[in-house]
Amino acid sequence: MVNTQEQNGFFWQAPKADEFYRKWRDDRLTAAEAAKSTGFVEISDLANPSKAEKSELIRRCKAANLALYEVPDSSDHRAELRDFAESFGLRIAEKHRSAGGDGIVALRESDAPSQTGYIPYSKRKMNWHTDGYYNAPDDRISAMVLHTAQPADDGGSNQFLDHTIAFIRLMDENPDYVRALMHPEAMTIPPNEEGGSYRPASVGPVFFPDAETGEMQMRYTARTRSIAWRDDPLTREAVAFLQSTLEKPDPMTISIRFGKGQGVLCNNVLHDRTGFDAKAVEFSPRVVYRVRFHNRVEGS
């Protein structure tokens, strides 16, 4: 069997002096800088992106793990998201109880019993994370779409950071930080039982190679409750440094408040969300559709 990491020319624990790593590092930083100013790819028909539109979205995902897009008409677009995903060979992984039969979750303020108490269904801010950080190793989330059907009246902005940039910051500071966060028991999310459903504990690394492509993936949350980090000094130092890097924020961070019909296609990069409509008396109108996938964007 071909070693996918060798095939990609990148060795996960290569020292900083390694030629492959230096070139990879320079390419990722250049792409991340460019991604901050490239704007949106306009898609005329979300269900059937043109060859040129697809090519540009894939190019951006390959270079910087994410691509911003917008659809000019004022439709809701939920019905088109499955076809959009299939255009990039994505396999829907959404098994969440809030997902409809189409595998799409509508993130909105809610008082439904199954959603009460969960931050995605409130107006509260969400800290830095990658999606599905609590999933089992055989159920990893490798890509996702966030599509804004209706923005908040106030707030609800997002920040995005290519996870390879976080890796580089750690490597630049101390390569041993990377090794600590690649440990198979680096991060544990305890089991959870809620509303009759049970989710077992999720134990695994922070950085790991995608099973199909060998490309870097990340599993992370900045939460401080219901999480256990491997109990050794190096891991604690690495986690503290990563949290500090994200909170500054990193210069390569993309900050954006999506309008209606705008969204992101990405290989599950780091992201957060500000709070929104804090003074609203009624429920916020904000609706964002989330679709998550087991595989990366095809060709990226």
Image: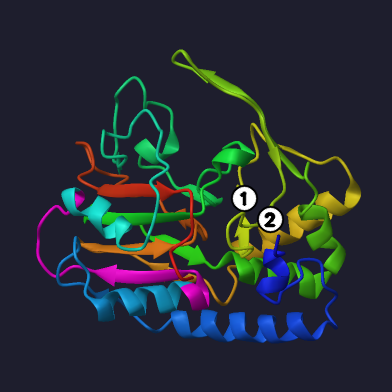
Does 195 sit above or below residue 154? above
Q: Nearer the viewer, residue 79 or 252?
A: 79
Residue under the image location 28 percent in, 49 percent down: 288
Does 296 sit above or below residue 95? below
Does 100 sit above or below residue 158? above
Residue under the image location 36 percent in, 56 percent down: 145
User: Percent x, y for residue 218?
Assistant: 62, 56
Residue 27 visible: yes
Q: Which element carries disc 2, helix, strand or loop?
A: strand
Q: Is residue 74 magenta?
A: yes
**Mark 1 — residue?**
219
Asked if the residues shown at circle 1 and circle 2 are in contact, with their CB atoms under 8 angstroms apart, the answer is: yes
Q: Nearer the viewer, residue 114 or 9?
A: 9
User: Percent x, y for residue 149?
Assistant: 20, 53
| Residue furthest top as drawn | 196
Res 208 label? 2
Q: Which element carries disc 1, helix, strand or loop?
A: loop
Res 45 label? none
Residue 150 visible: no
Q: Assign the N terminus to one quadrant of the image.
A: bottom right
Crowd class of label 1 (few under 14; some 14 to 19; many from 20; radius 10 Å)? many
Crowd class of label 2 (few under 14; some 14 to 19; many from 20; radius 10 Å)? some
Q: Which amino acid type corresponds to the residue marked 1 in the rendered image? A: Arg
| Residue furthest front as drawn | 1
Residue under the image location 61 percent in, 58 percent down: 217
Query: Magenta part of the protein: which range?
Result: 62-78
Q: Which amino acid type corresponds to the residue marked 2 in the rendered image? A: Phe
117 vs 130, left or right, is left
